[in-house]
Image (spheres, rainbow, N blue to C red):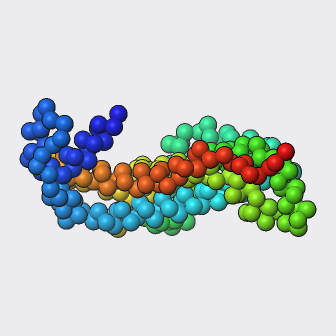
Amino acid sequence: MLYPFFAMLNLSFVPNGEIFNQGGKLFFTPIGLENYSNVFNKIPLFKYFINSLFVAFITTFGQVIFASMAGYAFARLKFKYRDGLFLLILITMLIPPQVNIIPLFFIMRQLHWINTYQALIVPGLFGGFGIFMMRQYFLSLPKDLEESSRIDGCNLFQTFFKIALPLAMPVIATLTVFTFVSTWNSFMWPLIVTNTESMRTLPVGLAIFKGSFREITLWGDLLACSVICTIPAILVFLAGKKYFINDILQGGVKE
């Protein structure tokens, strides 16, 4: 499973003319930085990278905040039509994302958001999956902690931000990784709502780069782009990995 990733990394340093002369080898030579130099010179790769990083970061941050607040409200607050509204949110999870593309595009056009960061970010700020995940988690938390905080004088928002949210770090880390990776790898939506080079994200720029050399595919350059695309997702996962195995209530409640 790991070898294809190692091969991608290794071959990204091998000159284009030598890539298919590596039969039977585990480590490919010669190596150099020619491919990385090529991609930065041929396309505005740094701009694509910054666009993807900005869109993925803002979308992930907004998704976590809104999903956490909505999930806590559905789990702990009692209000009219709560169950019905949550059912509607669950129904949206059953609709294929491709079905929403055309209506979303018309909404973006009416708002004059085509080829803007708003079009890339706003539709991803809200999602049924994140709300469902956070609600199920908050339902599993013991109410004793929240009741104790209210006795100590905390209001609803203080209880949420000081008690519930810190305890939810494992599920927040999971949602962060899922949202960041899916946004970072998103191709179809950025392709539809962007039409200038300055607004393209990395997956779209990589696809256009591949299609711009139809007579010959520069595999070394493409592998270098692929390595650059992969690094942020791996770093985000490594940053959130430790929260996956933490005991969420360690030291929280003592019998």
* Occupied quadrant, residue 150: bottom right
Quadrant of residue 91 within the rendered picture: top right
Is 146 placed left or right of 35 in the picture? right
Residue closest to the far right: 151
Residue drawn 36% across and 62% down? 49
Looking at the image, the residue that sits furthest to the top is 24
- In the image, taking residue 167 as reference, residue 3 lies left or right, namely left
Residue at image location 49% in from the left, 55% down from the top? 239
- Indicate the position of residue 202 as horizontal and vertical percent values: 35, 57
| Residue 125 pos. (x, y %) | 59, 57
Any part of residue 222 in sight? no
Residue 243 percent across, percent down from the top left: 58, 50
Q: Quadrant of the N terminus?
A: top left
Q: Nearer the viewer, residue 91 or 159?
A: 159
The residue positioned 8% from the left and 39% from the top of the image is 21
Q: Is residue 246 left or right of residue 84?
A: left
Residue 136 in sight here: yes
Whole-percent x, y for residue 35 in the image: 18, 56
